[in-house]
Image (spheres, rainbow, N blue to C red):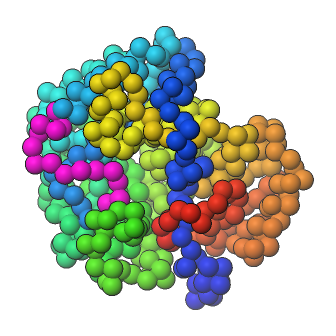
Amino acid sequence: MEQESQLTRLGLFDARVPRYTSYPTAPHFSKEVGPETFAEWIEAIPAGASISLYMHVPFCRRLCWFCACRTQGTQSDDPVRAYSETLLAELKMLKDRLAPGVKLSRLHWGGGTPTLMPADMMRRVAEAVFEAVPMGEGAEFSVEIDPNEIDDARMDALAQSGMNRASIGVQDFDPQIQEVIGRDQSYEITKRAVDMIRTRGVESLNADILYGLPFQDNARIAESVQKLLSLGPDRVALYGYAHVPWMARRQTLIPSEHLPTPQERLDLFETARKLFVADGYDEIGIDHFALPTDGLSKAQKAGKLRRNFQGYTDDLAEALVGMGASSISRFPQGFTQNNPSTGAHTGAIRAGKFSTSKGHVFTQDDKMRSRLIEALMCDFKVSTDELVRDYGADPVQLAKEFGACAEKFEDCVRVTTSGLEIPEKGRPLTRMIARHFDAYDLSKAGHSSAI
């Protein structure tokens, strides 16, 4: 109760803050960054470098009401095939601009529902990816799989194309909760998909589960977590449901009067967290869990954990290239985002141009604060020496900012001889502490609950 009282006093239960999967965050991207900038940054990737590739497939058979991702519904394969042809053309444009010898360290197909693609199209797209950017040694190819939209032919196509990590969204197994969030995915259907993945020798399995959904209580989330644990995922993301109906209109269908309070959300998170830890998972950052054998856990122990638009990652590539409508890319020079409209994106590619509609060019201060925030989000500590050495930060100014942060957050933040540290009791406040170092005006953008 004492900790909850302190968290209340520090504003955790009232705050809305970014998730800090990027810095600056996407609402601060500018239309001044366009296709020419994207092409320049692609061409600037050094020969022989490793890059990551994210491919967005925005289609779903049915739209889940809780989801705030850029997606659209379709009952036909025709739009998916047409979109896949656009991806093939976009990949050819990428190939033509990359320096020789560039290799893939990570490839991720996300959405939407990538498994809406017919099996033959999956093979064609995978071939085009590897023709544009071959897989490097130890590379990872992951795909988001909808258990309702997978069969033997499509799973064979993915496995034979080299998929070695699969990702499944669970959210919650409770039938009543699924009904009010517009989802229909039973434990049995999910287990069938997991069995299909494992029998094909796919090495690693990710799963997502949500807390903060309507009608969730500690008993219900515990039951869903136990069912998820029985499937043996190697890595789990425990995300807080972000109720942002002003950004995602489909969320107006969610019965907001039955959403847990912020204090109840913290209890739900703690219930799930304790179950994952008791089952042998390592805590990764603020909301991930991984088995000790998983790459994420190894990266954390080695001090090499990173944060990107997909959450936490062990990928060290300096460039993450996004293909498809609305995809975001990260380069050493800054961010770019493709046009979110599928039609506009397709039109640009057909005209032989990338569809970049906005982005951001990093300042030196951006780079320093990006690393500062990433270190807090990944390791709960940041080194003054690193920020001074690698980003030219002013140690006197850092000391002032660290001191002000520690004063604001009481004993939930500690100034140390090496920098700044968030002790265990302060970790629920991590996103708020990160916001303290955000130099941008956050009042213009609506964000999700801090817990």
Residue at screen point 76% across, 49% down:
383
Locate residue 56 relative to residue 76 in the image: left or right: right
Q: Is residue 48 magenta?
A: no
Left or right: where 112 falls relative to 354:
left
x, y percent for residue 437: 70, 58
Most foreground residue, 80 or 278: 80
Give the farthest residue toward the right: 396
Across and down, in percent, residue 157 comes to 18, 30
Name the residue rendered at 47%, 29% in the picture: 35
Please identify the dominant SS of the magenta region.
loop
User: In which quadrant will I find the N terminus?
Assistant: bottom right
- The residue nearer to you, when weighing 100 against 85, is 85
Q: Where on the picture, by quarter, is residue 104? A: top left
Residue 145 seen by the camera: no
Is 436 above or below relative to 96? below
Residue 333 lies in quadrant: top right
Residue at the (27%, 39%) spot, across then down? 343
Seen in the picture, residue 270 relative to 204 is either above or below; the reply is below
Say if 380 sits above or below 391 in the image.
below
Q: Report the label total.
A: 0
Q: Which residues are magenta?
A: 66-81
Which residue is most to the top? 100
Residue 334 in picture, x, y percent from top left: 59, 37
Q: Nearer the viewer, residue 88 or 19?
A: 88
Front-lying residue, 151 or 33: 33
Q: Is residue 67 magenta?
A: yes
| Viewer can see residue 79 | yes
Residue under the point 86% across and 47% down: 394
Give the x, y percent position of residue 192. Answer: 14, 51
